[in-house]
Amino acid sequence: MRIPPATAGQHAEIFLQTGHSGSVTSVSYSPDGKFIASGSKDNTVKVWDVQTEKLLRTLAGHSDNVSSVSFSPDGKFIASGSLDKTVKVWEAETGQLVRTLAGHSYHVNSVSFSPDGKFIASGSYDNTVKVWEVQTGKIALTLTGKKNW
């Protein structure tokens, strides 16, 4: 089955990939629609070519389930959040680990790049949102929620 790259305003067909050994918990299209990153309970992120439906690379480094994945706006990086309390930043093209962002005291369940790609926001079960500087790995901001929302 051939799937056209996803572009704004077009509906992309959905296809099933098997390759993770655990449930898939998160997916993200690259900005150009050519690739999909998938995070899983097998502690990995996998990068897929949408057109060929082939697995390109596996990003291994988390010690617990990957709960969220996100491509940077320029498509050069992938952020992954995990139950291991970390956010990892990867080079999308090579799969090389750029840095690990540690600072949450409980599971990270959501990650997202800022529109300019300079920051990553991560949400955690520790009731915080942390905003990280991608280039330095430093925390720029911590938003603290109420306990037991």
Image (cartoon, rainbow, N blue to C red):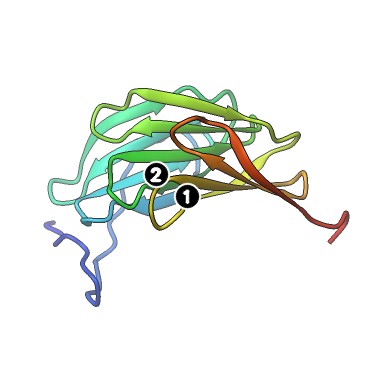
Q: Label 2, label 1: how many angstroms apart (C-alpha)?
A: 6 Å
Q: Nearer the viewer, residue 141 or 86?
A: 141
Secondary structure of the residue carrying tag 1 is strand
Left or right, 147 with respect to 122, comes to right
Q: Label 2: few (<14), some or many (≥20) within 10 Å? A: many
Which amino acid does the dot numbered 1 rest on? Answer: Ser
Q: What residue appears at the point 49 percent right and 36 percent down from the top-left corner?
A: 22
Instruction: Residue 79: give x, y in percent of width and height.
Output: 45, 40
Instruction: Residue 111: give x, y in percent of width and height.
Output: 53, 48
Q: What residue appears at the point 25 percent right and 27 percent down from the top-left corner?
A: 94
Instruction: Residue 85: give x, y in percent of width and height.
Output: 66, 32
User: Answer yes or no: do the residues labelled 2 and 1 have beta carbons within 8 Å?
Assistant: yes
Quadrant of the snapshot with the C terminus: bottom right
Task: Give the labeled residue for mark 1.
Answer: 26
Quadrant of the snapshot with the N terminus: bottom left
Task: Give the labeled residue for mark 2.
Answer: 38
Q: Nearer the viewer, residue 14 or 118?
A: 118
